[in-house]
Image (cartoon, grey):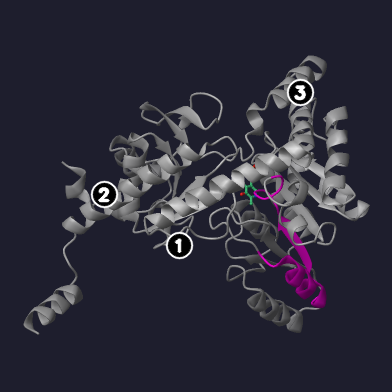
Amino acid sequence: MELRDQLESPLFTHFISDYAQPVGPDLLGRTEEFFQWQEARRQTGLWPYSRSLEAAPEASCGVRSETGTCRQGLNFGSQDYLSLSTHPEVIATAHRAIEQYGLHSAGSAMLGGNTAPSLMLEKALAEHLQMPHVALFSTGWGAGFGTIVGLVRPDDHVVLDALSHQCLQQGAMAATHNVSRVPHLNNRAMRRKLQEIRARDARNGVLVVTEGLFSMDSDVPRLEELQAICHEYNATLLVDVAHDLGALGPKGTGSLGLQDMLGKVDLVVGAFSKTLASNGGFMATRSPAVRQFVRVMGGPHIFSNALLPGQAAVVLEALRIVRSEEGEALRLKARQNSLTLRGAFAEHGIECLGEPSNVVPVPVGDAKVARLAAKLVFERGIFANLVEYPAVRLRETRFRMQVMSSHTEEQVRQAAEVVCGAIEEARALVKARTRPSRAARLEERLQAEL
Ligand SMILES: Cc1ncc(COP(=O)(O)O)c(C=O)c1O
């Protein structure tokens, strides 16, 4: 059957969340229903996830779908924002570190897993963030989750910006039942929530959680105001800078540097996996006690193997470049690419969301249109990630495009052209196949009668 004839089938109308709460005694068997739905999407080219890169995440590369279809094309789906993962000096550093330290870390950071590069990296990050005490984690996820779980106890409270990353949400839920979410970037709502919590509980801790740059929306909180509100209510602010660190701000200091907040927020966590060319993450604090407490009490630092020495060396070298004049030039180039991409979409009547950053969220809205468009975009050799409900709200399906310094202007324009064309085509197809609603039919009839 043609895809256009299946627009009302689960292929288009169902979401992951429809399958997320299976019931029944057979823990394994009850995954089948989700699998069947996912498999139907996979086999019709409507499952644009879990693809693999055939080479380094460069501007142009080969990508293979889960069903094995391979396409050569333009890569707008990687978060190697300054293209440092293929920088010759970063690669040379990795080679040297492997020669010197071997491939593996010897254990958890508590038990022999620290190495000379990891100690140097802690120092370099401390200087970069103006936060003297840094703990490393082997993933960015572990840093966010582990810091919250390390500090927060069941009687404490966590208040998250509603769009905070899953590692922060799940960390909060693992630590306490007292979890609240306030509308995205709404400092007034945050103040009201803290007021309400403090009116009934002055005895326990309150952790407020936000991000330096929200990676689905490319927007940024007002950090100085938020930190002041937190202090007013004796709450602690944690900012996850995974996406802005290195990619934005003077010397790559991210939103903290841009807002003159270096060294001024209570806690910073982040990931190396976006700009700094390796997996890994960190927590930074002004307090040596907090560092030691989170290292020992936050599971992922103590119960997971440490960052590999080669990874630590790579991040250190990437951070050196981030802070150099070359880093400044790379950020400028990425910013130009972001502005060009946004401008090209605007020429087609599509206003990208948020502020200029390496993340360029392209709103589509209707999930049916977006799924069809994502299929066309891949077939035409553009790799851009589709973001659907529940990762974003129901009517807010979008492409999340990510620009890197290594994209050329021509590549950026070509990508916008292809994505816009695919969205237009998909929209026309869905419109042609969708029966007008009763209200629309009535309106049409009234207009005809007038
Ligand atoms: C805000 C935020 N925090 C943490 C992470 C997790 O980082 P990693 O993928 O390096 O574990 C991500 C990654 O997507 C993120 O966006």
Which image quadrant is residue 162 in? bottom right
Q: Residue reaching furthest right? A: 288
Identity of the amino acid at label 2?
Answer: Glu
Residue at image coords 34%, 35%: 380
Query: Where residue 384 sits: x, y (%)?
Result: 45, 42
**Mark 1 residue crowding within 10 angstroms, few (<14) / some (14–19) / many (20+):** few
**Helix, strand, or loop for circle 3?**
helix
Q: At numbered mark 2, what does the secondary structure look like: helix, strand or loop?
A: helix
Q: Which region is colored magenta?
A: 221-246
Amino acid residing under circle 3:
Thr
| Residue highlighted by disc 3 | 93
Of the pair 57 and 418, the residue shown nearer to us: 418
CA distance separating discs 1 and 3: 42 Å
Find residue 157 and report its image quarter: bottom right
Q: Can residue 17 be seen by looking at this rendering? A: no
Q: Quadrant of the C terminus?
A: bottom left
Circle number at residue 425: 2
Give the mark, 2 or 3, whose residue is nearer the N terminus: 3
Residue 89 placement, left or right of 35: right
Q: Is residue 162 left or right of residue 263?
A: left
Sequence-first disc among 1 and 2: 1
Q: Does the residue at mark 2 contact the one at mark 3 (Cβ under 8 Å)?
A: no
Does the numbered disc 1 mark a residue whose Cβ is under 8 Å from ligand 1?
no
* Three-letter code, disc 1: Arg
**Dot 3 surroundings within 10 Å: few (below 14), some, or many (20 or more)?**
many
- Residue 239: say if magenta: yes
Task: Give the numbered dot on residue 393.
Answer: 1
